[in-house]
Image (cartoon, rainbow, N blue to C red):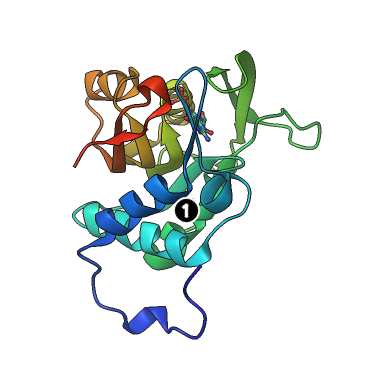
C-alpha cells in the first residue's frame, strides 16, 4: 500500500490510473463462483486509502463538466470512494441506508435485490438529505446487474433530485447493469471493466 508521506494535493493528474487499478485487480483480485470478483484486500474489507484517493480524483476528472452539489452512495463499500469524491468536490456525501432506521421519521424507501447476498432489501434516505435542489453523483464500488443503481434512481425520482451521473470502481460487463443505466439515459463511468470471470480467470477490458 503506497501513500505514506505523500502530499496528494500537489500530485498531477494521474493519466495511468487505469493501469494501476488493472494491476491491482489482477494481483489481488480473486474469482468466486457465480461471477463474483473478490477485492477484499483493497476495497471491500481492508481498504487502500491511497488507491481510493486516486479513484476519487479520477471520478472528479471524468465528471468535470457536471454541476454536482451532492455525492450519494450506498453503505457500506461505496462510502470510501464516495467520501473521497465529496472531499475533492467540497460537497456533502449522503449514504443510503440498507436498514430502515426507527430514528428517522420521513424517508424515501426503495426495494433492491442484492446480487452478492441473493436477497431483497429496502434502502432508504431521509427526506432531510435529498431533495429537488440536489444534483447528485452516485458512486459505488461495483456495477453488476444495476439493482443498486436502479434503487438510487428511484430514491432520487421520489425526492425530485437530478442524477448527474454514476461512477463505479469496477464494472462487470457480462452482467446487465450498464445496459439498464444506459436505458435510463444516465451518464456513467467505470474505472475498470471486467469482461469475463469465466473459469475463474479475470479478463479486463483494456
Ligand atoms: P448490482 O446492484 O449492480 O447488481 O450490484 C452492485 C452491488 O453488489 C455493489 O454495491 C457491490 O457491493 C455488490 N457486488 C456486485 N458484484 C460484486 C462482485 O463481483 N464483487 C463484490 N465484491 N461485490 C459485488
What x and y, as percent, mark residue 156? 44, 31
The residue shown at (23%, 71%) is 13
Seen from the viewer's position, the closer of residues 85 and 129 is 85
Seen from the viewer's position, the closer of residues 137 and 45 is 45
Kindly tell me whether residue 135 is visible in this rendering: no
Asked which quadrant contains residue 114, the reply is top right
Which residue bears the numbered disc 1?
Answer: 81
What x and y, as percent, mark residue 12? 25, 77
Residue 68 lies, with reference to residue 136, above or below; the image says: below
Q: In the drawing, does residue 162 fall left or right of residue 105?
A: left
What x and y, as percent, mark residue 19? 26, 56
Does ligand 1 reach within 8 Å of label 1's beta carbon?
no
Seen from the viewer's position, the closer of residues 170 and 182 is 170
SS at mark 1? helix
The residue shown at (23%, 51%) is 66
Kindly tell me whether residue 173 is visible in this rendering: yes
The residue shown at (74%, 36%) is 104
Amino acid at each position: 500500500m503506497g501513500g505514506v508521506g505523500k502530499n496528494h494535493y500537489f500530485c498531477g493528474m494521474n493519466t495511468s490510473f487505469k493501469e494501476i487499478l488493472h494491476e491491482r485487480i489482477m494481483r489481488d483480485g480473486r474469482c468466486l463462483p457465480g461471477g463474483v470478483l473478490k477485492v477484499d484486500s483493497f476495497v471491500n474489507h481492508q481498504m487502500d486509502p491511497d488507491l481510493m484517493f486516486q479513484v476519487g480524483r479520477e471520478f472528479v476528472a471524468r465528471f468535470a463538466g457536471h454541476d454536482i452539489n451532492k455525492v450519494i452512495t450506498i453503505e457500506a463499500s461505496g462510502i470510501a470512494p464516495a467520501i473521497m469524491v465529496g472531499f475533492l468536490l467540497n460537497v456533502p456525501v449522503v449514504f443510503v441506508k440498507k436498514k430502515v432506521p426507527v430514528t428517522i421519521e420521513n424517508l424515501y424507501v426503495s426495494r433492491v435485490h442484492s446480487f452478492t447476498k441473493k436477497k431483497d432489501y429496502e434502502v432508504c434516505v431521509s427526506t432531510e438529505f435529498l431533495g429537488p435542489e440536489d444534483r447528485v453523483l452516485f458512486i459505488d464500488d461495483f456495477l453488476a446487474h444495476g439493482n443498486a443503481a436502479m434503487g438510487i434512481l428511484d430514491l432520487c425520482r421520489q425526492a425530485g433530485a437530478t442524477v448527474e451521473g454514476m461512477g463505479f470502481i469496477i464494472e462487470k460487463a457480462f452482467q446487465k447493469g450498464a445496459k439498464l443505466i444506459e436505458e435510463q439515459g444516465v451518464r456513467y463511468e467505470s474505472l475498470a471493466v471486467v469482461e469475463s470471470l469465466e473459469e475463474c480467470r479475470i479478463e479486463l477490458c483494456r
